[in-house]
Amino acid sequence: MKIVIIGAVAAGAKAAAKIKRLLPDSSVEIFTKDTHVSYSSCGLPYYIQGNFEDYRTLLVRSPEEFRQGGIDVNLETNAEKIYPEKNVIVVSGPNGRRTESYDRLIIATGASPIKPNIKGIDDFINIFTLRNIEDGINIRTQMRKSKKAVIIGSGYIGLELMEAFVKNGLETVVIEQKSHIMSNFDDDMSDLIRERIESSDYKNFKIVTGDRVSEFFGENGVLKSVITEKGQRFDTDLAIICAGVKPNIELAQDAGLKIGETGAIEVDKLMRTSHEHIYACGDCAEKTHIVSGKKVWIPLGSTANKEGRCAALNAAGIYSEFEGVLGSTVTRCLNTTMSMTGLTEREAEQIGFTPVSVTIEKPDKVAFMPDASDITLKVIADKITGLLLGGQAIGSIGADKRIYSLTSALLAHLTVEEFGNNDLTYSPPYSPTIDPLLNATQALCKRIAKSC
Amino acid sequence: MKIVIIGAVAAGAKAAAKIKRLLPDSSVEIFTKDTHVSYSSCGLPYYIQGNFEDYRTLLVRSPEEFRQGGIDVNLETNAEKIYPEKNVIVVSGPNGRRTESYDRLIIATGASPIKPNIKGIDDFINIFTLRNIEDGINIRTQMRKSKKAVIIGSGYIGLELMEAFVKNGLETVVIEQKSHIMSNFDDDMSDLIRERIESSDYKNFKIVTGDRVSEFFGENGVLKSVITEKGQRFDTDLAIICAGVKPNIELAQDAGLKIGETGAIEVDKLMRTSHEHIYACGDCAEKTHIVSGKKVWIPLGSTANKEGRCAALNAAGIYSEFEGVLGSTVTRCLNTTMSMTGLTEREAEQIGFTPVSVTIEKPDKVAFMPDASDITLKVIADKITGLLLGGQAIGSIGADKRIYSLTSALLAHLTVEEFGNNDLTYSPPYSPTIDPLLNATQALCKRIAKSC
């Protein structure tokens, strides 16, 4: 049995290691364009921030470790073509171009940063995107000799890099073309996130929304400033494009594999593509949303790991289903923890639910504890069925705890009424007697006109 | 409609406030032996520790606030007898003895500290139990003029008081007659809790297990030392008895109300006793365990609040069920957060499950984050059905987050396999890519021989 894996950051690396453990006699071969395998790309903002000095800290498993485990690793080797009917792929790399046969193929080609169409975007050496380790090293090097930075986009990577730059003393401007930052939250919660971040002790940053960089300016290939559509000009020593990512589907598409309605590679619950011997997992693959049952594309490292594992099990002949995702995220930016799971109210409405929500602000511990601080919690349910649909939390460390509890509830399709009696742990240093989560679900229950 | 409530710390206070909101025209009257109503007894160790100076910080609602809300409060008034067939109770207090009629009666008489049969236990003014605000004030006063303390019992109150005394500089000895401290955990986890606490930077304490105070010694009514069965002698300036509590059922029992097999007042899901017009809630009432379906008596403040609410709804004629408890707790002692939910492995076995467990020790965040620290997590499931039965976590702040997630899973009766794909939030400052909870449930899944 020979298993070939294309791409090996999270999903591919996980799949390779898992298959080799399941089938020690199999041949497992990794091909990747990248110069590294098996690393924490989510850790890059913390490497840039300076939480640790050696980028190798990010490596989960080195090529040598894979090789010692009997897994072939081909770095900087591009998979150019898949011939599904012949069970072969064509690769080209340092050792030239060749064909490789496989019994099972796992595609884990990931996603790539979107580069908006902005004048000058390709003209300067100090405009970056952040995806792989080289990007991280380059950004950190540039940051350390810079005084000013511009970040384009205010999703979680944008905000994590903002924290990194701000804590390193750079005057940092985040420019978001939408009306709200962190648009995976509902607008009311985005407003609170922004308000809270702007109340941080750090003052060396500015958030601009509803505007868009229209041109990059510089000299001799070095960016010096940006100008926005509304005419705001910001001098800068570097710019980072954090305008989202798109799934790397070209190889799969070219091979005739089905692409889903979300634009990512279509897979079933076994992570199988439209060809029975080919699996796809991680950021290149489509997902199913557990709450809505709809196909979604939410690329996250934690999901990639689970999908890589599931693909490996099935490729090894062991039946395993991946149920799907909840879109759960947590992000830190300066003084703010923001975390969410499930559907936003906006998404719930678009999908056809009748969402009703409650937002409360409460102490996260009993108010008399010295380190109590407020948490804002929004919980969303369907008015017709009472089904819990999602939740969003903003606060200090600990806000994420409430979302951890909600993910299990969403996974189990609990109603808000069923959740109301949840026996959450209580002690003054950890929670109020009645947790904000229960305050919110009880209030929500009343709005659904159940006997709560 | 006249509702009489006996006892008003947590369950009774909650019930009173809730009923008055539901039925503004009703007459609601509280009778309590206590000098205070509606306070956080769980906050007493933190008042003693000195986290705040004024005990009134512990008051959720003062008698005056109740009265302004139209609720009569009778302090230091003992309910002596209930005549269920006549719908009256006899009370005696500052205004003498009288009868009070009711349409609905809510018994919330709470629990009392168990006083072990030890020679000298009643002879000294500096031996305390901790239950109400006077106890808290007295202990704090005594602590502040003391250098040495002995705590008898190592449950959560014992350990919370140990933290308070240790942080106030007292040489503190905890004496536990069982072989393990915190015996609501499995023994293997209790060992780890002890090990971790003993590795704290604080060194002014000693934990003694498998021994028992056999006599208190003192002079002129003042305790000076204790001696144990094994002959250990400890000089001390105060002693606290934290040897557990028992439900206050005498009044109910005398009235002919059914007492459950656990020794607490029997109630149905509506918190109704064996008499249809009488409800019981809080520490005096029996509970149903959601995982085992068995009757249990686990007295906790968070449960008392929910039960008070449920009793109020039903007493007001609004149907409401209280599903039961998971026995979820969290306790802090010095450097250690210990939290649990559901059944221990020991309990699961006694009840007739076939428990199988996995215990892992992992970083609670991605290991490269500066504040990552290890968490030990034990997850228990039934080998036959895969049903999740319980979990225990030991670590720093954040260990409780994993238990928050498990409570929802237990509430929903998830199997370990269903839990395995839980889309928990991930970001390096908050969790590893694969949360320890998923490591544990995946390992457990394998032991149950499912396709995990």
Image: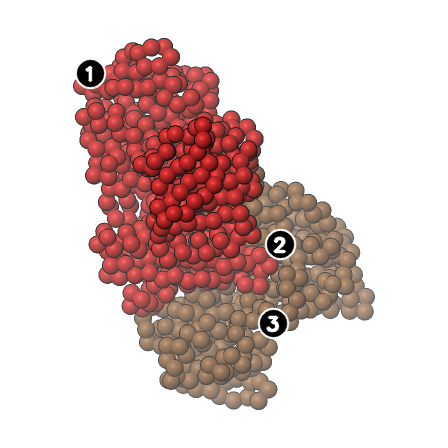
Chain colours: A red, B brown
Q: Is residue A121 visible?
A: yes
> Do pointers 1 and 2 mark residues of a single chain?
no
At which x and y percent is residue B407? 42, 52
Residue B243: image quadrant is bottom right
Crowding near the residue tagged with mark 3, few <14, some 14–19, many ≥20 C-alpha atoms within 10 Å: some
Q: In the shown orientation, is residue B204 left or right of residue A35?
A: right
At which x and y percent is residue A25? 35, 16
> Do pointers 1 and 3 mark residues of a single chain?
no
At which x and y percent is residue A151? 43, 41
- Up/down of A65 relative to B9, above or below: above
Q: What's under tag 3, amino acid-wise?
A: Arg
- Dot 1: what SS? loop
What residue is shown at x 39% (from left), y 18% (from top)?
Answer: A75
Q: Chain of mark 3?
A: B
Given residues A238 and B397, the one toward you in this image is A238
Residue identified by numbered label 2: B159
Of badges 1 and 2, nearer the viewer stands: 1
Residue identified by numbered label 1: A86
What residue is shown at x 32% (from left), y 22% (from top)?
Answer: A5
Dot 2 or dot 3, earlier in sequence: 3
Q: In the shown orientation, is residue B227 left or right of residue B43?
A: right
Q: Chain of mark 1?
A: A
- Give the quarter of the figure containing the N terminus of chain A: top left
Residue identified by numbered label 3: B56
> Do pointers 2 and 3 mark residues of a single chain?
yes
Q: What's under tag 2, amino acid-wise?
A: Leu
Given residues A285 and B452, the one toward you in this image is A285
